[in-house]
Structures are given as C-alpha cells and as structure tokens.
C-alpha cells in the first residue's frame, strides 16, 4: 500500500516569512495530491491540490509543487499571517480508491 | 456549502461496548467515507461507500462496519470497543471515488465525533 511521510512535524515562522512543508509518497500509481488545513477543533478543509500531470500549482499565497520522479510534493506558503497557524496535512490518492494522509505539520506564525 | 453533519459530537464509552456514529449531508452526495484521526495524527481511511455498497476499505478489523442509506446518509458502527479506538471519527463526502475511480477529488469533512473509550 501507499505510505505518505510528512516533514517537519512542527514549524514556527515569523509573520511575513515563508513556510515550506514536504511530503513523500511510495506508490507511483498515486495521481492526486491534496493539502488540507485543520484549525484547532475544526474539520480539515482543502486549501490546494495538484494532479500528477502537473508540476506546480499556485493560488495567491499558496503553491504546491510535485516531483513525480522523486515521489515528493511540497506546500509553500508565502507572506505568512497569524491566521495561517493550523495543522496542515498532505495526502495521496490512488486508483485503490483510498486517500493516504501524512501525520501533519503544526504551523505557528509568530506576529 | 456541502453541510456535512455528524452526530454525536462527543461520547464516552467503556471497553467492550458498541457505538454507532452518524453522518448526513445537505447535498446528498453518493460517496461517503469514514476516517479515524487519533490525537496528533493524520486521518486514517476506514472505508468508503458508493450508492450503498462498500467499495474501499482501509486496514481496520471487521468490528468496524458501516452502512449507507438510500438518502446517502451513513453510519459507522464499532463493536467490542478497545481503548485504542479513542479518536476523532470524521465522515467525508466527495473525494472522487466511485465504482471505477480514476481521479481523486475534494473531500468535504464533517466536524467529527470524538469518541473516548475508558
């Protein structure tokens, strides 16, 4: 089965700086890679996703890059704001009809 | 707004008991999946239902079972509760899964049911 690893587990940045979270996956059949943000006590919500036929996708301050050969993908948040503080999860989906989630990164943006 | 609703929001059970968790959505989506999220961990896939049939299962024992009803609401049942079953249980609709899934899609999660087993 698929194995998704996520690093770092915790990340603190100064407001305005950039944050990068990295994930690796093991199954080359995985073809869809979403990122979810989960605020304390709230449900996970999709913030950006990328499919295996694309190398990079950007949405305002958030971007995701995918390297299929190396089987890794990364979340980039620029100009961080205090409201970006949350736990972020990467995930991989393959044709086994299943999402595999990483263990999460707790991001703290220091004002 | 997909409006995924889960109940109950919190519950406490003792070892060996059984629990039923419920999920419904305003949109009546035909795909529903359940996840277990232990404290400090990512969601772990339990199973998925598409049009009332289970069409995907994660690495969970048979004492985890489910149902999807004609109105696409769903239940997760856990028998013979163990201490390690203590977790947040999330229901999600969407995800792109179906009888022959090719591409994933956005999962819309409910707020979850937090189960504590004593």
Image (cartoon, rainbow, N blue to C red):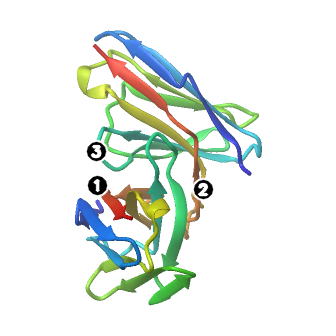
At 39% from the left and 60% from the top, the residue drawn is A88
| Tag nearer the camera, 1 or 3 | 3
Name the residue tied to disc 2: B99
At 29% from the left and 55% from the top, the residue drawn is A103
Q: Considering the numbered disc 1 on the image, is that residue within a helix, a strand or a loop?
A: loop
Q: Considering the numbered disc 3 on the image, is that residue within a helix, a strand or a loop?
A: loop
Using the image, determine if residue B70 lies above or below residue A111. above
Work out whether mark 3 precedes mark 2 in sequence or the reverse, and give the earlier one. 3
The crowd level at tag 3 (other Cα within 10 Å; few <14, some 14-19, many 20+) is few
Coordinates of residue B9 in the picture (x, y in percent): 53, 25
Name the residue tied to disc 3: B40
At 40% from the left and 14% from the top, the residue drawn is B12
Coordinates of residue A14 in the picture (x, y in percent): 33, 71
Dot 3 falls on which chain?
A: B
Q: Is residue B94 visible?
A: yes
Dot 1 falls on which chain?
A: A
| Tag nearer the camera, 2 or 1 | 1
Using the image, determine if residue B7 lies above or below residue B30. above
Q: Nearer the viewer, residue A94 or A50?
A: A50
Q: Nearer the viewer, residue B49 or B22?
A: B22
Name the residue tied to disc 1: A103
Are dots 1 and 3 on a single chain?
no
């Amino acid at each position: 089965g698929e194995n998704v690893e996520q690093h770092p587990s915790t990340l603190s940045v100064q407001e305005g700086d950039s944050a990068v979270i990295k994930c690796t996956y093991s199954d080359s059949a995985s073809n869809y890679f979403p990122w979810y943000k989960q605020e304390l006590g709230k449900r996970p919500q999709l913030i950006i996703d990328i499919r295996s036929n694309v190398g990079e996708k950007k949405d305002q301050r958030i971007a995701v890059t995918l390297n299929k050969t190396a089987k890794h993908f990364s979340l980039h948040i620029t100009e961080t704001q205090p409201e970006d503080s949350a736990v972020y999860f990467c995930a991989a989906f393959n044709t086994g009809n299943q999402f595999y989630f990483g263990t999460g990164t707790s991001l703290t943006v220091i004002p | 707004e997909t409006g995924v609703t889960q109940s109950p929001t919190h519950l406490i059970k003792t070892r060996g008991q059984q629990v039923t968790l419920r999920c419904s959505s305003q949109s009546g989506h035909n795909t529903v999946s359940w996840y277990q999220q232990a404290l400090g961990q990512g969601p772990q896939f339990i199973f998925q239902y598409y049009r009332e049939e289970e069409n995907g299962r994660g690495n969970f024992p048979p004492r985890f079972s489910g149902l999807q009803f004609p109105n696409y609401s769903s239940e997760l049942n856990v028998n013979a509760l163990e201490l390690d079953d203590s977790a947040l249980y999330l229901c999600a609709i969407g995800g792109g899964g179906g009888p022959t899934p090719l591409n994933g899609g956005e999962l819309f999660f409910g707020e979850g049911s937090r189960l504590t087993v004593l």
